[in-house]
Amino acid sequence: MRRIAIISAAVALVSAVGLLYFKMTAFSDTEHERVQKALWRLKHLDTIFNEGVLQARFGLVDNYDDFHAYDEELRSLVEILNQPPEPIDPAGRAAIEAACNQLVALWQERQVLFERFKSQNAMLANSRGYLPVALGELAARLGQVPGGRELEAIISDVTRLTLARLSSPDELPANAAARMQKLTDWCSTHADSPEARFVASLVRHAQHIVTGSGEVDGLTRTLLALPTPASIDRLSQAYDREVSKDLQRIRQYRLLLYVVSFLLVTGIGYTFLALHAANNRLEQRVEERTRDLARSEERFRTLCVASPIGIFMNDAAGRCVYTNPALQTISGIVLEKSGGEPWSDILHPEDRNSVLADWAVATRDQQAFAREFRLQPPQQELRWVSSRTAPVQAGDGKITGFVGTVENITERKRAEAELEVVHKQLVQASRQAGMAEVATGVLHNVGNVLNSVNVTATLIFDQLRKSPVLDLERVAALLREQEANIGAFLTHDPKGQQIAPFLGQLADLLKQENRNHLQEIDSLRKNIEHIKGIVAMQQNYAKVSGVPELVDVADLVEDSLRMNASALQRHHVEIIREYARIPPINTDKHKVLQILVNLVQNAKNACAESGQAGKRLIVRVANGGGVVKISVTDNGIGIPTENLTRIFGHGFTTRKNGHGFGLHSGALAAREVSGSLTCHSDGPGHGATFVLELPSQTPDS
Amino acid sequence: MKIIHLLASLAWLANATLLIQCHAAPDTNNPALVIKAREPIRPIPQSVPLDPRKVALGKKLFHEPMLSKDNTVSCATCHDLRKGGTDQLARSIGINGATGPVNAPTVFNSGFNFKHFWDGRADTLEDQVDGPTQANVEMGGTWEEILAKLQRSPEYVASFKQAFPDGIQRKNIKQAIAEFERSLITPNSRFDRFLRGDDKTLNDDEKEGYRKFKTYGCITCHQGVNVGGNMFQPLGLMGDYFGDRGNVTKADLGRFNVTGKEEDKYLFKVPGLRNVSLTGPYFHDGSAKTLEEAVNTMGRYQLGRDLPPEDVRQIVKFLKSLTGEYNGQTLE
């Protein structure tokens, strides 16, 4: 609101100044000068004209051309003056017009008089000029003329008269007519004289001078008496009045102009001061901002200079405007100092085309550019760089340039290469480790079986050590002593008599012993067979999966229990079997057996560690939904909830001498036979259940 | 006091000398430009400032018979530029063979005349155009007719449009013809060359003729650029011209016909004598067939005496040196 008021006031003041100035200059200096010049020239011409009349009167003018020119100029001047400048009011215009008209009327009057004056004056001049000629001619003849003396006297009298008339134009000399008459009379009396013609001519000219000069003088006086100067003065005064009125008006306008100008100047001054103050504030702000900016810039620059990463800036046209020292080191050149696009020259030839294409796309689409490529600066070794650029946008969204980083990743690349080597080694190592793991698995599983083998072997050894075969040796030695009379001995001798029953007893014992041995050896054979299977299975790890075969699940479960039978017996674990009748399934017998052995073993361990009485192991085999479920449930130490998820991880164990492989390999094996191994526990002390699910019909069947 | 006066005089003299030097210096190099001072006759300027478009249009109009009622007479009929700007007849013949009341004066150098017609009834050449075009015995038309005829000509419509913003108008026709007439100047006569300093251009007879022209007082009326044409004079100042001639007509009353004043009876505009050897017959009535006759008549009636034949011969010789050039060609 205030702003509008100020602007309106300023506009009003400026318009007022303009209006006043326009009004002031309406009767401009040039107009004034034009009028004044015309008036001056008018007066001048009037004077010249009058002067010319006088000069003509006294024969000082030899031609009348100039008078015509004066007349024409006078008329044009009056025409000019009769067009008063615009600001003059109607009354003033009327006064000027009246003065002009009066002047024109006077001139017309003068013109008429002057025409007459010219004619008369020319005639007078003619006679005046001719008089001496006529006198001369006459004088030459007078000697021969009879009565010439008298004529001569008359002529000289008339000549004096005319000369007197010419010299004093005001009064006609006394008896002029009478003197002229004498000459005329002479002519009439001497009409037949040859001189009469000359005399008559002389008389006419003399008469003309006498009468004509009076008329010319009268005309001259009338002409000079014409009040043209007064008329011009009136016109001049009319103009002066108007000019002074105009000046008065201009003075008023000027005063007004001063006031308005003062207001305007005051306003401008105030505005200027306000502007100055505002400007100062602005400058201060700008200074602060500049300082901040400089600091920021300094920070940025320091950052840029110190940065190990190359930084560059391009303008919108793609010209490089800044590179930091790091980039100069990396690129080996100072980009902003070399024209054109030399950076493409240092690109590795193999990368050049693709980098430039990417760069072109990025700049065209004004998008970020990020990639790794190789640089081959001149006379320097190849280096890998990673460059990222981003467009810099101005406030209006226009792209003002690009800023980018270039990181020397040669080291990283080298490290990566090294890492790859290491990785390969690691892969190798892990393969070896895997083999070790496999070996561990083999050892573990084989170890489990070897326990049974050992037990069986020990059993056989003990039985054989205590074998009654040795008693048989003693009987044989006794018989060899009594070889001569073996019959007698067997029948008579007390000792001999005992041999037959002994042998019968021994045969029973040996028979029993043989049966036991066979049984143990069969167990041993089975265990060895299992070891063979494990080894074969391990070989299958590295190659293809094991050969699936039709197996009876209950048999497998029994096998696993048998393998752990001694340990279960040792720890007095009661085994409860709940086998559903299910058809044999097609699966990898050894893998499943291995899983089950592990599950039974773990259950046994869990029971053993709980240390409680009534250790129990429930083995269930169930069928349903295309899946055979084998669950092994113990009432051992249980599993904490947090461990339920980790329990199948490699290396997880809760036992001091455990190696955390059993369940891990079990889970893997379950997956390999397209089954699954899960675990459930209600927590520590509540036992645990492991469930192995196997597909009842494998895809192969 | 005397010393001061002397010094002042010296100073004035020095100034005057300086002024003379300043103003005279450029002219002394070209003798043709040095005009003989104190001679009553002034040379014709080499050119006058004019509007060439108006001159061209005026020239066409000047030769245009359409300006006459029956399309037979143009300005040039009586003011033939090949005949010294006259018809070389005592009285001109207008439409229908009518004879004019006075001799047709030359159109050459008419721009230097102070008034026009023998009785000076036109103040300007423009006003003069009204006369012949409307006179029954000359072109006999009316402005309405003339305007209508010109309007019908596309050529004139275009030419006028070019020379005047308001096209074909009565005043524009007059102005164009007047502008053309002002262009009809005949500079470089032998006498003008003499005036400009070339003494040899006149022979002794001619020089003597000029001297006598002055001595007998002819010069008092026949002076200025046009050797006349700037005043009125009575014909028969020293004798009864009309009484001797007899058969006085209205036209013989001269200036009286314009002013009605008794004193203006028999007053005529003094004719200019430029190219006078080509513009006969002479006087308003065309009564003088030859220059010699005209000079004798002048001597008899204006000076009141008979001039000696030798003087007449020399004066005529002088008058013949007044023939100038039009468009660079000496008039014949």
Image (cartoon, coloured by chain):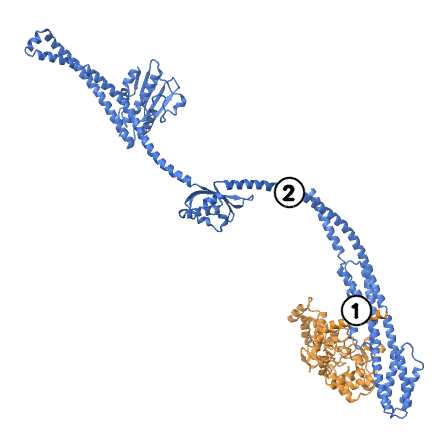
Closer to us: A566 or A306: A306
Q: In which quarter of the image is residue A628?
A: top left
Q: Which residue lies furthest to the left in this view?
A: A484
For disc 1, the neighbor class at 10 Å (few under 14, some 14 to 19, many from 20) is many
Q: Going 56% across and 44% down the picture, which residue do you hit?
A: A396
Q: In which quarter of the image is residue A109?
A: bottom right
Of the residues under marks 1 and 2, which one precedes in the sequence?
1
Residue A197: x percent and y percent? 85, 89
- Tell me the kind of residue under disc 2: Leu
For disc 2, the neighbor class at 10 Å (few under 14, some 14 to 19, many from 20) is few
Q: How far apart are marks 1 and 2 (CA)?
A: 69 Å
Task: From the image, tell me which residue sits under label 2.
Answer: A282
Q: Colour of chain A?
A: blue
Q: Which residue lies furthest to the right in this view?
A: A174
Name the disc covering residue A74, or none. 1
**Does dot 1 land on a helix, a strand or a loop?**
helix
- Chain painted orange: B
Residue A332: x percent and y percent? 45, 46
Placement of the N terminus of chain B among the 4 image quadrants: bottom right
**Does dot 2 land on a helix, a strand or a loop?**
helix
- Tell me the kind of residue under disc 1: Leu
The chain ID associated with circle 2 is: A
Say if B323 sits above or below A644 in the image: below
Relative to A537, is B186 on the left or the right? Answer: right
The chain ID associated with circle 1 is: A
Task: Note whether residue B89 is visible.
Answer: no
Task: Note whether residue A283 is visible.
Answer: yes
Residue A152: x percent and y percent? 89, 88
Q: Going 75% across and 71% down the picture, which residue do you hit?
A: B18
Relative to A345, is B176 on the left or the right? Answer: right
Q: In which quarter of the image is residue A84?
A: bottom right
Closer to us: B297 or B92: B297
